[in-house]
Image (spheres, coloured by chain):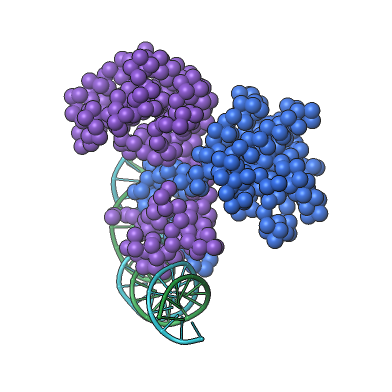
Chain colours: A blue, B purple, C cyan, D green
Amino acid sequence: MAGVLRSVNNALAVLESFSVERPEIGVTELSQTLGLGKSTVHRLLTSLAARGYVRKNPETDRYCLGFKAFEVGSLAAGRGAIRDIAAPFLRSLMLAAKETVHLGVLDEWEVVYIDKIESDHPFQMYSRVGRRAPLHCTALGKSLVAWEPDDWIERFLRRRLRSYTPSTLTEPADLRRELAKIRTARYALDGEEFALGLKCVAAPLFDHSRRVVASLGIAGPAVRLSNDRLPRLAALVRESAAAASRALGGEVPV
Amino acid sequence: MAGVLRSVNNALAVLESFSVERPEIGVTELSQTLGLGKSTVHRLLTSLAARGYVRKNPETDRYCLGFKAFEVGSLAAGRGAIRDIAAPFLRSLMLAAKETVHLGVLDEWEVVYIDKIESDHPFQMYSRVGRRAPLHCTALGKSLVAWEPDDWIERFLRRRLRSYTPSTLTEPADLRRELAKIRTARYALDGEEFALGLKCVAAPLFDHSRRVVASLGIAGPAVRLSNDRLPRLAALVRESAAAASRALGGEVPV
DNA sequence: CGCTACTGTTCCGCAATACAGAACGCCATT
DNA sequence: AATGGCGTTCTGTATTGCGGAACAGTAGCG
């Protein structure tokens, strides 16, 4: 890897080794996972711990992520404070729709969930703030892609797009049509394209430069997001996205 | 610094150079700020960018934080998913109190805001998720400290505690009395101890091992959190914290 | 247009740093 | 007591990360 500092790369790989399934990891396990010597891993952890990115559990002598990662990460999600500005609109959308709602942004050919408010339903889409999802088969993703520049969209359509369900669109011609529909309708629908039984509707947020900077979406089980309910939800999500766009100094283009 | 890898330390210092005031920074500026050569900084940025922790704005050739930091940071805030479990209680507390509410946790002698839901009031406490505040003069902080082990509290009280307002308690004897009051009342009050004009009430969240793992708080201007309103807010915050504790498998100790 | 100033990027020699292996200290199990 | 496993410390050395210089590009000015 040209120009990449190996020790920095290793340190970041350490950070990325932690997960929901593995919140706490020991030196030896990290050593095996990363293919580095134990003393190397120990030094990396010591360096990360010195600034609060990881912390050691004194009872188990294992390490977990520290709050410094959260602090820096919160700044990254700020991104011109989109998240803060959109929060009240996300909230009122959840209250109106009575379903879980998400705020997502485009990053490296994927959508990243940067906020989420869960409904009170016991049965709902599993998602995690900070996680990613594909662009081509999620409502959030499609409503982010639809307003990208044509050359970007063509580059995107040239990538291998994975099929998740029989409904997933992977052919460029199909997706071009879908994106055109989204631009006309001003919202996107995921009809079990990403996961069977899961439907979402989403609409884009525009900022002052008329660019889509995020997307708001309603997600839930297909049994609840039924065909007679979807037009109402689409209208809600469009209204919330338009209101959030105005708060961002933008307008939905006519 | 013994045992700390210099290049890793430098990379983390780069990450911490970004702020709300400076979301985008150039190589030369970072070089001056950090006291490192430009090519060193460039290499650090390249390494961080390779894994998505920073990204380069191609229009300005300057760098900003990338979403990888957010992804890793979101895991750090997960912390046994306290944040997710507490979210609905935080929300209903905001709706009941009609003031901004926070969720905070103890880290390195400070409270870290890990969640926040703002009220619709145009005038409210300024805070940011991911930021820190002192323990001894905030309601969130005090309600976290009050249930720590005695030896920890004594160590804490031996630290130099800064005075922010004429109301700030900094003397160990004063703070011991205050913490005892909090344990009896089961909530903490910040009566303009951190900032003039700002009041907060907060109550602790207990988990299944009877330890305080977070704290819920209501914050607002003193003009709104008036003395006749505070008992009601204290009751609300206690109820919400108790309910969130139960969701965490804990109980408020009697 | 040429010059200056400033930026981010690339190149290169070399000293310092990061590396891995071995040893150590501690704990739990047999 | 011996063994096994862990995290931590130590050490020699190869390699890596460093800074300075040069480069490439852009903007502003006379």
In the image, B220 versus B40, the foreground residue is B220
Which residue is located at x 66 percent, y 44 percent? A252
Q: Quick check: B84 left or right of D17?
A: right
Q: Quick check: A197 left or right of A18?
A: right
Whether residue B17 is visible, yes or no, is: yes
Q: Total marks drawn?
A: 0
Which residue is located at x 47 percent, y 23 percent? B98
* Placement of the N terminus of chain B among the 4 image quadrants: bottom left
x, y percent for residue B176: 22, 23
Q: Quick check: B200 left or right of A216?
A: left
x, y percent for residue B223: 35, 24
x, y percent for residue B157: 22, 31
Which residue sits furthest top? B254
Whether residue A41 is visible, yes or no, is: no
* Placement of the C terminus of chain B among the 4 image quadrants: top left
Compared to residue A95, the image places residue A111 above or below, namely: below
In the image, B136 versus B77, the foreground residue is B136
Compared to residue A221, the image places residue B228 above or below, namely: above
Which residue is located at x 75 percent, y 42 percent? A185
Which residue is located at x 53 percent, y 49 percent? B67
x, y percent for residue B239: 45, 16
* Res A167 quadrant in image: top right
In the image, A236 versus B239, the foreground residue is A236
